[in-house]
Image (tube, grey):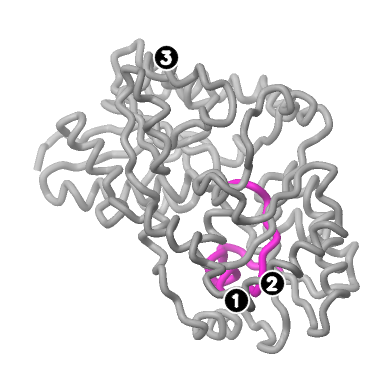
Amino acid sequence: MDPKPLKIGILAGEISGDHLGSALMRDFNAISGDQREFEFIGVGGPQMIDVGLEPLASIDQFLVNGFLEPLLKLPELWALYKKLLDDFDSRKIDLFIGIDFNVFNFLIEKRLKKKGIRIVHYVSPSVYAWRKGRAKKIGKFVDLLLCLFPFEPGFYKNTDLNAVYVGHPKASAIEIDKSELVRGRSRERLGLPMRSTVLAVLPGSRKSEIHLLFRVFIESAIAFSKRITTPVVVVIPCANTRAKEEIELMKNAFPSIDIRLYEQELSSVLYASDVVLTKAGTSTLDCLLHRRPMVVSYKLGRFSYFFARFLVDTRFVALPNIISGKEIVPEFLQDDASAESLSEALLKELKKSKAVEGYFSDFEEIHRQLATGASRPSLAASEIVKFFNL
């Protein structure tokens, strides 16, 4: 074993990044065996900390959304930025890995690159959706870009950036074929009635998302329950205790429907469900991989939405639709996301999933694509080790 551990700075500012980061850290250790020791310092969630991350700040300090909220928290974020730069400098890191969380990580990466630090950015920014000119700029401060989706490296083909498709680790962690027995076992595990219709509601983990989406999602669930004959149970997987406490306070305003909260139980909740109402984002990929019919929605504050209309250039917001290039799951955004429209769409998708042969064929095709190269140890970790000759 090399007597000197390789010090890797790593920063994930979101829960989805925590999942990716923890898998990547485990895979580094699996690849190295007894040849080299890796030391990880930076920011991550509970999963990364469990794998051995030495935290320099709490991930909760980064949980902001939209355009206005980051501006309001700018002094706090700037102080964190300065602190982390000082910490990475004083600890003399050998490599930095920024996991998604693009704006903040790009700022960190630019400064560290000037100091001669090797840079990896894990998860391509959405250059296909907005500010397409970023593709060339990223290459000035990123050495290696790891892409989760197969269409992404093509956006960098005319740049000097090394962009590599590595698959999505979630795709290999979840089996493509799961029997209906999983639904029954999951309901039993969560204490859910077998003969009910289980509606999973995923309003997000950020406070701003919860406040923008929770009410209309539950109103949609109530409207949905009036459209069917079986009792409806709403199940909500909470990413952390903070999100659970926030939702717990808000759900008391809806005593007419059975709402149950579960912390750190996303997979079981999805397997137990019949249909899902989810925010746009990585949760749509979770629904696809668990083979669950879904309706996708998103709302921004009016200030944020006003600017987003001029900046975003994409046909879709749901990952299944973006990957496939067509609408395979329904999307309802901003004012179109009403209780009436969402409940009607939920009923329609539930019926189609039971009646239409091949309903999940597009889901399965995407699942197979994303599982390519995402075996254990992951291609992501292997590409980093190979690229930098670690």
- Say if residue 243 shows up in the picture: no
Q: Is residue 140 above or below residue 17?
A: above
Percent position of residue 22, x then y:
39, 49
Q: Secondary structure at mark 3?
A: helix
Q: Which residue is mark 2?
A: 350
Q: Which residue is mark 1?
A: 272
Q: Position of residue 205 (x, y in %)?
A: 65, 50
Location of residue 198 in the rendering, given as x and y in whole percent from the top left corner: 70, 76
Q: Which marked residue is nearer to the observer: mark 3 or mark 1?
A: 1
Q: Amino acid at mark 1?
A: Ala
Spatial separation of the CA atoms under disc 3 and disc 1: 46 Å
Pointers 3 and 1 in contact (C-beta within 8 Å) = no
Mark 2 residue type: Leu
**Quadrant location of the N terminus in the rendered image:** top left
The first of marks 3 and 2 along the sequence is 3
Decide if residue 343 is on the left or right side of residue 274: right
Disc nearest the viewer among 3 and 2: 2
Dot 3, crowdedness within 10 Å: few (<14), some or many (≥20)? few
**N-terminal-most mark, 3 or 1:** 3
Picture layout, residue 290 above or below residue 316: below
User: In terms of sequence position, does the residue under pointer 1 or pointer 2 come before the other?
Assistant: 1
| Residue density around tag 2, few if under 14, some if 14–19, many if 20 or more, within 10 Å | some
Could you say which disc has been placed on residue 111 in the image?
A: 3
Residue at position x 29%, y 28% in the image: 95
Which three-letter amino acid code belongs to the residue tagged 3? Arg
- Look at the image and give the residue range highlighted in magenta: 261-281
**Which of the labelled discs sits on residue 185, or is there none?**
none
Q: CA distance from mark 1 to mark 2?
A: 14 Å
Q: Is residue 303 above or below residue 44?
A: above
